Image (cartoon, rainbow, N blue to C red):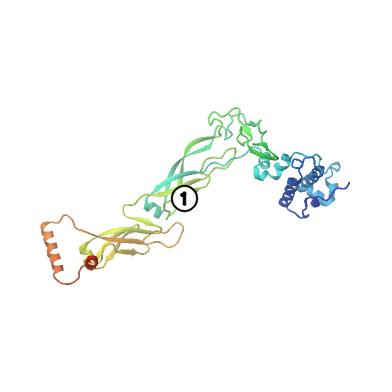
Amino acid sequence: MSKRDYYEVLGVAKNATEAEIKKAFKRLAMKHHPDRNPDDKAAEEKFKEAKEAYEILSDAQKRAAYDQFGHAGVDPAAGGGGYGGGGGSFSDIFGDVFGDIFGGAAGARGGSRAYRGSDLRYNLELSLEEAVMGTTVKIRVPTLVPCEECSGSGAKKGTSAQTCPTCHGHGQVRMQQGFFSLQQTCPRCHGSGKVITDPCGTCHGQGRVQEHKTLSVKVPSGVDEGDRIRLGGEGEAGQFGGPAGDLYVQIHVREHPIFTRDDNNLACEVPISFVTAALGGELDVPTLGGRVKLKIPAETQSGKLFRLRGKGVKSVRGGEVGDLICRVVVETPVNLSSKQKELLQEFDASLNGTGTRHSPKATSWLDGVKKFFEDMKP
């Protein structure tokens, strides 16, 4: 009896992609496999037919031969390497179809595995000036590096790792659960596909040893608390030829005695005498770039904010330079002499005798208190 067209068997077009062919076969295999249809000869034949079609069309070379010569191009008798008969186990077929889900097929064909090294984190403490202006610092980091004695193989010099007898070098072992075949990392070689019978005396078979290395870290200007600097390939060494991990430098900014930072702005408190607050004047105010003059107008109240444009921070992410926000605090004089106290009492008496409201906030507050008690009367 002549065979049906393989594309017709799977129900796909001749220009179907590999993913479409795999999807079509999975659907038919789930429906017709003998494990799911015991004693059903018709289902078994349909499964074998679908399996044969999938084996040809999922192989690029066989598919090309089939497209050009038809069944003759893949007939075993003609050297085409076609379907070899037999139902095969459900696990053998689905190890390929579901390999990307359970990690089976790729691991089985991949042999020993290379593992990327772990990422590391280093906490770097900076002053506010260093964070704002940028700096270069040297750090000393403990890390794992390839063992020089064994060149990272983990085996004693002059020997080599052997193929794992449990997984036969695949790095994975297969487990049967119902009609599904699941694969997991080999418990003996931990996925490497190799075992070391004679380990290196320096690294004890690990292929890596712990050392400290000194690195130069360039901190860009404008970094802030919580920012990270990535140093590619400066983490732990990989295993079995795998790449090294990365080092992440975590920025922490020490508390500053004068300034606090809010995004791109800086803030500080500026104490002034009550004479300067009343009469006005000029003060030298510190900035990260040097001193500047701050003009205090007459009758300035405590808590008033003054903004110095462009005296803040330019963020590492770009944008405009922030401002410096100065909050003036009127300071009460202390340690007064008798003469100074007497002068203040005379000054206070002169204020009370003029009939002019010299303290508008205090007057408004007292008026509010008076009204409050009046409203409480029955």
The answer to which image quadrant residue 263 occupies is: bottom left
Identified at 75% across, 40% down, the residue is 35
Rendered location of residue 224, percent (x, y): 42, 53
Q: Amino acid at mark 1?
A: Arg
The answer to which image quadrant residue 196 occupies is: top right
Rendered location of residue 8, percent (x, y): 80, 52
Identified at 28% across, 66% down, the residue is 295
Can I make out residue 369 in this image?
Answer: no
Q: Mark 1 Cα within 10 Å, few/some/many (few <14, many 20+)? A: some
Q: Where's the C terminus, which quadrant?
A: bottom left
> What count of labels does the image hold?
1
Drawn side of residue 80 relative to residue 219, left or right: right
Nearer-the-camera pick, 370 or 261:
370
SS at badge 1: strand
Rendered location of residue 38, percent (x, y): 77, 40
Query: Where does label 1 land, which residue?
Result: 228
Drawn side of residue 315 relative to residue 60, left or right: left
| Extreme residue toward the front, this view | 378
